[in-house]
Amino acid sequence: MMIDGTLRLWWASLTDFDGLFEGLTAELPGQERERAARFRIETARHRFVLARTVLRHELGAAIGAEPHTLGFVASDHGKPCLAFPEIDNPPTFNLSHSGDLVLLAIARVDVGVDVENLRSIPKAEKLAHRFFSPAERKSVFELGGEARDHAFLRIWTQKEAYLKATGLGVGMELRRVETEPDPGAHPRVLSISGDPEEASRWTLLEVEVPGAVCTVAVRGSKPALEIRRFTPANLGRR
């Protein structure tokens, strides 16, 4: 059972599970199988199935429960949390996916994770005008090519990770979350709706994931971080 303060992050690639998705889907509870069936695009369906598989296996391992026995409920803001089995101080968790990747973060404190495939962002300047602070926009506009795309995605994932950690999600405008604009500096939240005190309660971590930009937000000081790759070999490990 996970009882320490380590932040654990698992990442998985769809390509590692080629040919296994039918079996993975069959192992999910009926409600999750029905949700998977509603995805018309195969890649999106596979991402959902893999995300639920990683969550059930690793959260189950963290609390000493079988994957199929876990039950979840949504908070007032829609953020999923563990409902069954009922345990004192259950771990918190958050999922993210982009392209071929699925990520899961598990911690003892509020946690949020956001990942984006490193790719060209043709509308970076337009999106930055809409969602970024003046300083954040400046850091994007001063760069070009891949450096601009990376800077944009870095700021974007910082904002999203914080919002997902709080459970606010789309309930708060991205531009109200001001983050570190300097691509060479450590990621951090500078202010929330102009309030630096609230921002100081959070720590952002930039995590290296192949071909992607990833940020994790946790409440409190910087935790120990453990990153692992989830592969088919994990399916048989209990």
Image (tube, rainbow, N blue to C red):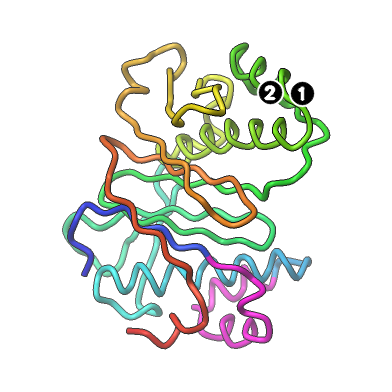
Instruction: Report the mark closest to the observer, 1 or 2.
Output: 2
Does 226 lie within the magenta span?
Answer: no
Residue 83 in percent (x, y) is at 32, 62
User: Left or right: 124 with respect to 17?
Assistant: right
Relative to 24, say whether 109 is above or below: above
User: Left or right: 238 with respect to 96?
Assistant: left
What residue sits 38% from the left and 70% below the top?
Answer: 58
Give the image quarter of residue 200.
top left
Does 28 lie within the magenta span?
Answer: yes
Relative to 235, say whether 1 is above or below: above
Disc 2 marks a residue whose amino acid type is Val
What residue sits 47% from the left and 84% below the top?
Answer: 233
Q: What stretch is highlighted in magenta?
A: 12-37
Report which residue position mark 1 lands on: 125
Pick the quarter of the image with the N terminus.
Answer: bottom left
Relative to 90, say whether 129 is above or below: above
Report which residue position mark 2 lands on: 140
Q: The residue tagged with tag 1: helix, strand or loop?
A: helix
Please tell me the numbered disc located at residue 80: none
Asked if disc 1 and disc 2 are in contact, CB closer than 8 Å, the reply is yes
